[in-house]
Image (tube, rainbow, N blue to C red):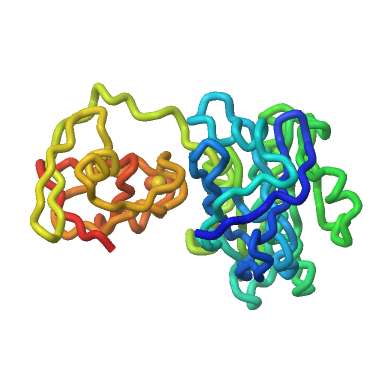
Amino acid sequence: MFTVTVTDTHDETDTVKVLRLVRSDGGALAPYPAGAHVDVTGPTGITRPYSLCGPPHDTGAYTIAVKRETDSRGGSQALHDKAAPGTELTVGAPRRLFGLAPDTAARHHLIAAGIGITPLLAMAYELHVRNAEFTLHYVARSRSEAAFAGLLERSPFAGRVVPHFGLGREESRTALANALQGLEEESHVYTCGPHDFMAYVREVAARGLPEERIHSELFQAGTPEDTTVDTPFEIELDTGEVYPVPPGRSIAEVLEENGVPLDTSCREGICGTCVLRVIEGEPDHRDHCLTAKEKAAGDQIAACVSRAKSSRLVVELW
Ligand code: FES
């Protein structure tokens, strides 16, 4: 973690604020691949992951776009209300859970909805520099609600951007289905946006591509699980300690209450920060960060949201 200073802010839309961050000690920022995110601890101490949405080759500053979420823990609201030029924030090293395929890809199809544009914007910058073949489809309720619409229109890759603004749900789906018809062999699809949107894009893309060429990143968890269906279980550490996890409490909360250090960020099963290795027992996966393959393997668990189907889970702290 290191300290950064906000040097500039502006409102992209009524609900999306853009922050430019530089290192407070004047040092160089760590380089990052397109699609990477950083954990940002805001003025009220809440940490949230944000995609880096500036050009990845510009390492002088990090740019993040924060959507005001009124029903979350308040991290985004604090950045909207309190972050101004001069404000200091704490930022973790960039992490890549979502990234571009190697240069051998024939074409890259970037499909964004709403604030999901942020990692795909960084990817578009990178693909443009690589001189790669790509198209960026951008779905939003209206142009005025589409963050970076003006920037995309003025960008050197504006001709590769296909806006789908102001369409109804079915019209958007039809447009995307048409766009993803007859996908070239060796092409890759990347999508970011609400859960339902990405599920649809994944479903359509899977008609022409294997799963490993379809990449997605979730920005917002869905409705929290109904804790009335939770059953109690025990969590055992590889060091031998055993703690009960009651309904309504997460593994992460139980470990923290017992003084066990555990890194967390989103606490919504999105970012992957809290993932632990499972040595024994059967996880009840409720996260959005592990892939279907990883969930089926059963040897990892997102401690902030997932639970256990077995009466005990034995985990290893990384
Ligand atoms: S803290 Fe983000 S997935 Fe658990």
Residue at position x 70%, y 66% from top? 56
Q: Going by the picture, which residue comes out furthest to the bottom?
A: 104
**In terms of depth relative to the viewer, which is nearer, 197 or 299?**
299
Q: Is residue 284 above or below residue 74?
A: below
User: Could you tell me which residue is drawn at 35 percent across and 29 percent down?
Assistant: 225
Judge by depth and name the residue closer to the eye, 205 or 76: 76
Residue 214 in sight in this render: no
Residue 246 point in image, percent of width and height: 17, 31
Q: How far across and down, in percent of the image, does residue 128 sit?
A: 79, 67
Residue under the image location 49 percent in, 63 percent down? 212
Determine whether 264 is above or below 131 in the image. Answer: above
Which residue is pictured at 44% across the width and 47% down the height? 265
Relative horizontal placement of residue 219, taking residue 258 as reference (left or right): right
Q: Can residue 149 be seen in this view?
A: yes
Left or right? Give the position of 278 relative to 122: left
Residues 76 and 118: in front is 76
Percent coordinates x, y for residue 297 in the rendering = 27, 58
In the rendered image, the vertical position of residue 46 relative to residue 35, given as above or below: above
Asked if 30 appears above or below 299 in the picture, the reply is below
Quadrant that contains the C terminus: bottom left
Residue sitting farthest toward the top: 228
Count up the numbered dots.
0
Query: Is residue 257 rendered to the left or right of residue 71?
Result: left
Coordinates of residue 92 in the picture (x, y in percent): 52, 58
